[in-house]
Image (spheres, rainbow, N blue to C red):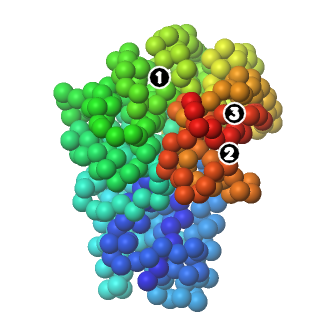
Amino acid sequence: MNYFIHTYGCQMNIHDSEKIAGILEGMGYKPCDNAEQADIVVFNTCCIRETAEQKIYGHIGALKKLKKSNPNLIAVVCGCMSQQEGVAEKIRTSYPFVDIVLGTSNLNLLAKAIEDVGKKKRFVNTDFLCYREEDFMQSRTSFPNAWVNINYGCNNFCTYCIVPYVRGRERSRPIDDVLKEVKDLVAQGYKEITLLGQNVNSYGHDIGDVTFSMLLREIGKIDGKFRLRFMTSHPKDLSQDVIDAIASYPNICNNIHLPVQSGSTEILRKMNRRYTREDYIALVDRIRDKIPDVGITTDIMVGFPGETDRDFEDTLDLVRRVKFSSAFCFVYSRRKGTPAYSMEQIPYAVKKERITKLLACQNQVTKEISATMVGKRYEVLVEGANFRYKNTMCGRTESGRLVNFQCDESQTGQFVTVQIERASSATLWGVVTEEK
Ligand code: SF4
């Protein structure tokens, strides 16, 4: 019996798919390369952008044909899209060949749902049940990297964002559970562990007596050669204590993903981000003061309702000033059910022009940073082959920059020293050297 999982969206979903794979493997299923070879197909969906959602409906629709040729195929839709209001019902009525619909917080019901389908019953349930990670196995697919959830959901309600509606309110995992998972991963030989949460900085506020900086310090004390990263940090919650913890422990990477979203205080206010442009710049200064070689990455949105040319210029100015090592730049996508949905929208042509300018601006910044790295040596964790290039391996520096180089594939999971030889904007090329 084979399974195939189609994962859409962010790292949180990719990690959820590892949990789904773990449940299926625990039931005796084996992974396969495509839906045609599968006995169970899972769509782990995303709803952050409207275009992604339309594409997913198209992919689900295509299953109808597959079901005709293989009537025993089990079709599952889960994740953020199915958690949106009205979507589970739409799938139930308009896609009768879908057997199971689950939400974001009840993956633990998957085994029971498959049993029901075996008894010719459809299973549709999007209740928020808040499973425990420890209740089922995970099938990790990213060695030497591993992902560890520390909190789920979000309380921030940025006015453009659908996440709090589909992932629920913030819930932190008990610190002992997180520490045990990290220690086990280190003992199993994983070399880079990334803590995951919609807003990792607010970890612990709902369970009392623990904070994110305490968690970082506890992980920092774990013996063994490994790196720790975390994402995502909300700028309003990144405390001095967290900055100090990063600076104090060598195994906590000097890399912070700090979504700014806009460089205009007025737009930030409309987004309900609860910091100003000046707050953000001051925070970056504080981080750089304590961690001089830090790599700061970000998310930036253009075309939020009401964004004027002046607001957009402020964003470009902030990008030049802060010098992000990289930025995920995207166009605002209107999501039903969020406050920004009913705000006055920006014409598509304006958004398109702005995203082109923003990408050019960030590319220039990245290129300048890359040029300063040429000739220097960095410790890099070998992550595996870079299939875009022949005979090329890749890995990341501590600050999160991707480097291409040549070494034996068997060195995957090892730390090597790489001297950077050339750079083309975002891509660095280097050679493995003996000494640092
Ligand atoms: S912090 Fe804002 S953008 Fe991030 S998940 Fe929460 S509501 Fe969405």
| Residue shown at 29% from the left, 54% from the top | 133
- Depicted 167 relative to depicted 61: above or below: above
Q: Disc 3 versus disc 2: distance between alpha carbons? A: 9 Å
Outermost residue to the front: 434
Q: Of helix, strand and loop, which one carries label 1? A: helix
Q: Of helix, strand and loop, which one carries label 3? A: strand
Tell me if label 3 and label 1 are in contact, CB under 8 Å: no
- Camera-side residue of 31 and 355: 31
Q: Residues within 10 Å of mark 3 (few under 14, many from 20)?
A: many
Residue holding disc 2: 405
Which numbered disc, 3 or 1, marks the residue closer to the eye? 3
Residue 37 appears in the rendering? yes
Residue holding disc 3: 420
Residue 196 appears in the rendering? no
Q: Position of residue 35 (x, y in %)?
A: 57, 76
Q: Which of the image's four quarters has the C terminus?
A: top right
Residue holding disc 1: 235
Q: Earlier in the sequence, mark 3 or mark 1?
A: 1
Q: Position of residue 158 (x, y in %)?
A: 48, 31
Would you identify the image quadrant in which residue 368 lies?
A: top right
Amino acid on which disc 1 is placed:
Pro
Left or right of 17? Residue 311 is: right
Q: Position of residue 214 (x, y in %)?
A: 27, 27
Q: Earlier in the sequence, mark 1 or mark 2?
A: 1
Q: Of helix, strand and loop, which one carries label 2? A: strand
Tell me if label 1 and label 2 are in contact, CB under 8 Å: no
